[in-house]
Image (cartoon, rainbow, N blue to C red):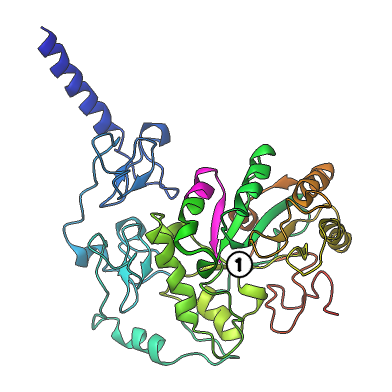
Amino acid sequence: MGARVGLLLIVVLGIAVAQECTEPPRDDRRCGAAFGNARCRPGQCCSRNGRCGSSSSHCNPRSRCAREPAVVSEAAVCSAPPLTSGRCGPDFGNAGCSDGECCSPSAWCGTTPAHCNSRSLCPAATTTPAVQPQRQQHQHQRPSRRQASSSDGPIRAMSSCGNSRRMVALTFDDGPTPGATEPILEVLADHNIKATFYLTEDNTGPAGCPLIRRLLREGHMIAHHSKSHPQFNLPSTNLRREMESPVAWIAACGVDPGLVTHFRPPYGQLRDDQVQEISGRMGRRRFVIDLWNVETMDSDDGNTNQESIENVKRAMGTIGVGNSAVVLMHDYAEGPRIVDAPDGNALVQIIEYFRSLRYRFVRMDECYAQCDAPRCFGNGGPTHWASVFDPDPNGVGTFPAE
């Protein structure tokens, strides 16, 4: 009798697990009964915590749903023209990728090992005769700095969430850095705030992987801030290396690089052709380019935390209370830390300042979701140093360069 009950229980559990993964995949990669019975993408499993992935923490005997079978015909999966969003595979109309790119297990086009591996939805793309002329034009006829190509998409960029919105996004550049990022996370947790962290590969390397995973566990947003933090406007900058290497690094940390959809240029500097390549080029992975309109100056030599707070208030005097703010700070250990300077915890005071103004704290993806156009800006903007990109073509910045 006991054996029969046990067998019946196994059968019932098996049916329940199977029924957990019957609906289409979600964009946020959550799955199982708690998330509308969503299934995962091909090659992925639904972990015990309801997250899709292909690692051993997702695919194991305790998985809520077994690995989704790979699609039988790779050619059919990637038979449609590339999308401007850089997405691909069966969940995106069977869109393919540009020549030389693979469709990653998480349905993003790219050329890094995270995209091209044994679990790729589609291997490196090759041009078919039906689309060859158009694709060759895209590859070989690069637009000049002042003339956009017919294959360019709209520039997606932001320096705020727009006017008439009481929203503030706290952002941190150059980390994550052991010893510098953790105190910031503790403050954010104490105040129940989610922020955005722009990752710089060479500042932390493999040592930053546990922190990247912690950022995601705690609900923060991770974004791209280059490999080596160069001045992008200089001819010596290798754009492809600076953009692609961090994607592979994030994947090596066990994190889905498809989560990284926003990019902040070091020093805010970009040439016109780089803006188009990073955000507007069709058939390639496209990023939203993030700037800011409130600069704390916390990384400047000799800057005190009280000066950082005054810089925030001065910027808000230009922006106007009631309009949105994107606050630039840093979590790089070699610079002044905004949470532990002798003159007080500036981050706590900045949070209290915006709360006193009845602002809502948001991540940058939430901020951009409020925008009515691909270029999103309001009052204020990034400081107008030479070569700083401003999403507002007529912008004057929060305060001019001295």
Give whichever of 246, 397 is nearer the camera: 246
- Residue at image position (62%, 73%) is 266
Whether residue 265 is situated above or below residue 387 in the rendered picture: above
Q: Is residue 373 left or right of residue 139?
A: right
In the picture, residue 172 is in which quadrant? bottom right
Q: Amino acid at mark 1?
A: Pro
Task: Identify which residue, 275 or 132, lies in the foreground.
Answer: 275
Q: Which residues are magenta?
A: 213-224
Q: Residue at x 34, y 88 (%)?
A: 136
Screen quadrant of the N terminus:
top left
Q: Is residue 84 visible?
A: no
Q: Is residue 326 left or right of residue 150?
A: right
Residue 54 in the magenta stretch? The answer is: no
Q: x, y (%) of residue 162?
A: 73, 60
- Identify which residue, 15 or 93, lies in the foreground: 15
Q: Going by the picture, which residue comes out furthest to the front?
A: 342
Q: Give the image location of residue 372, x and y in percent.
A: 65, 60
Q: Where residue 363 appears, x then y in whole percent?
A: 62, 52
Q: Nearer the viewer, residue 19 or 256?
A: 256
Is 324 above or below relative to 291? above
Q: x and y percent of residue 225 in the render? A: 56, 68
Q: Quadrant of residue 299?
A: bottom right
Mark 1 lies on residue: 374
Q: Which residue shows up at 72% across the image and 73% down it? A: 392
Which quarter of the picture shows residue 230?
A: bottom right
